[in-house]
Amino acid sequence: MTDWLGLPALASAHGGQIDSLIGWTHVFMLILFVGWGGFFAYCVVRFRRSRHPVASYTGTTSHTSSYLEIGVAVVEAILLVGFSIPLWAARVDRMPPESESLVVQVTGEQFAWNVHYAGPDGRFGRTDIKLLDLQANPLGLDRSDPAAKDDVTTVNQLNLPVNRPIIVRLRSKDVIHSFNVPEFRVKQDAIPGLTIPIWFVPNVTTAEMRTRTENPEFQYEIACAQLCGLGHYRMRGFVTVLSAEDFQTWIDERIQEEAELDIFQ
């Protein structure tokens, strides 16, 4: 259904389920639109003034409209119980084990996305508001903490391995933002004071998507989907999906760079 709905290309394992739900919703709404429109046109013709110059206080005795309303309720129940609730349960209640996933913390601020990787030890280093520096340390990461020694941070750039569960812990430093990557079919508000997890499995690398779209400049884009201030329009981040080997190479290089910076500091 992705193509005829005009949706962005799919790049996540669960995206087909989302598109199927959207597609069936459109199908049922089209049926309702045509059905109710036809019923309205029938009533306009059937009960026109020239045919009924005198008002009928008895009215129609048919139960057709009741049956139609019951049918609409059944369709809505199917959409809710058959599609939406199972999909919600799979995406929200069945979070994959962190031991099998890449866990990333993404913190929104006006007007950037701060990305924090735990490093090989799997532990996120301590952060301290006193260490915040919008240019040098936007997350306030305390490099003196042993758990932070191998942490990697980036701004507006999220690198991910392909075909591996990704758990993104969303946060916000100031106002409500919304993390939205259309190709992954994920969108979730980042709310100050809360840590909200979302997960997905990217299954198309950036290089492969560039080949599919015949666009050598293609990038997965993180768009803020919540009006968050005057600079909302420029709050853009990018996701690069790499092979497992390329991702490991990148993370190793960044850890080395961070270690060299610590030596000089």
Image: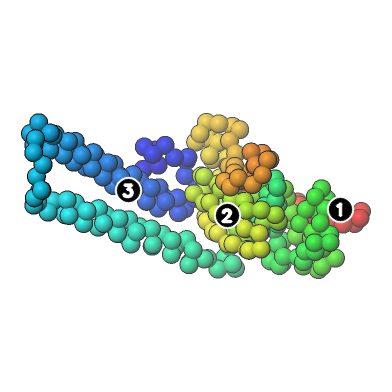
* Viewer-nearest of discs 3 and 1: 3
Q: Secondary structure at mark 1?
A: helix
Compute the Cα span from label 2 to label 1: 33 Å
Amino acid type at circle 2 is Asp
Residue assigned mark 1:
261
* Viewer-nearest of discs 2 and 1: 2
Specify the label residue 189 is tagged with: 2
How many marks overall? Answer: 3
* Residue drawn at point x = 58 percent, y = 62 percent: 197
* Residue drawn at point x = 87 percent, y = 57 percent: 262
* Residue drawn at point x = 59 percent, y = 62 percent: 196
For this view, does 224 lie left or right of residue 149? left
Instruction: Return the disc, 2 or 3, that comes first in the chain's sequence.
Output: 3
Q: Residue furthest right?
A: 264
Residue assigned mark 3:
24
Instruction: Return the disc, 3 or 1, that comes first in the chain's sequence.
Output: 3
Query: Contact, CB < 8 Å: mark 2 with mark 3?
Result: no
In the displayed structure, 261 sits above or below 38; it is below
Q: Secondary structure at mark 2?
A: strand
Amino acid type at circle 1 is Leu
Task: From the top left corner, tell me how far across and down residue 65 is, in percent.
Answer: 17, 51
